[in-house]
Image (tube, rainbow, N blue to C red):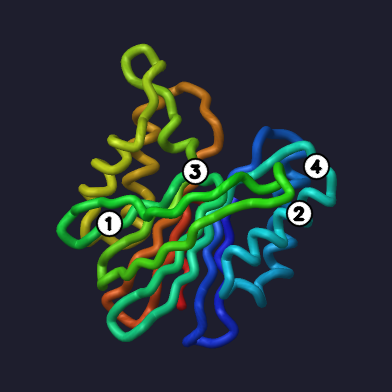
Amino acid sequence: FYDVHPGAGPDDEILAVLGDVCGKGLDAAVLTGKIRNTLQALLPMADDHQKLLALLNGALINSRHTRFATLVLASVLRQGSLTRLRLTSAGHPAPLILRRDGTVREAATSGTLIGVLPDIRSTTVEASLAPGETCLLFTDGVTEAKGGPLGEVMFGEERLRAALGECAGLPAEAVVERVQMLVSEWIDDNRHDDIAVMAITAPHTTHLAAVDGHTPGRYTA
């Protein structure tokens, strides 16, 4: 699942969330709804990712759900020509940052699952995007997608990094489409877990682009 929460004003931070709930079916759908609703209620605390995640974790523990979730939070703020990011992972694959020269690096954020233990840990890191640079959020369904000649080889982070590196300078929509196309080609007709991708691209204009792989159009702020 994924959500983009605009700030109260044009100069306020935007909070992007991408997450993954363990399992499928009704229970997973109910937990997904609870997480999204709880995050909506906790938006006033979005300036402190650790506090927000701790409160979310407590809400899930108290609800006695038997499933867990992973999340990555991305707070996004325009400052002059740069786009500032605060990134925090809770048991989720770390975001990848694509520079204008095609180099790709992993944001050094990590943390524990949500909804399992009373106390969680997480690390928030900061990064800056120059115009045209992209931060990619994704679920492990991307890297764990199995394909190849026998359908038993994972797509893997190395292929994802290579695919992302080829997208230098492209708009967010094109980055998402390219990654999804390559993963779909890799798995061919094989069934696989849900795949979600979100690209946050620093604009050359006055608008920020945050594009996921399912909702038509784009979010701008």
2 or 4: mark nearer the eye? 4
Which residue shows up at 58% across the image and 46% down it?
A: 112
Left or right: 91 in relation to 40: left
| Dot 2 amino acid type | Lys
Residue annotated with mark 4 = 65
Residue annotated with mark 2 = 34
Measured Cα–Cα span from mark 3 to mark 1: 17 Å
Which badge, 1 or 4, comes first in the chain's sequence? Answer: 4
Left or right: 204 in relation to 58: left
Residue 51's spot in the image, x, y percent? Answer: 64, 66
Residue annotated with mark 3 = 139
- Element carrying mark 2: helix
Q: Residues within 10 Å of mark 1 (few under 14, many from 20)?
A: many
**Res 98 label:** 1
- Element carrying mark 1: strand
Measured Cα–Cα span from mark 2 to mark 4: 10 Å
Left or right: 205 in relation to 15: left
Does the CB distance between marks 2 and 3 fall below 8 Å?
no
- Element carrying mark 4: loop
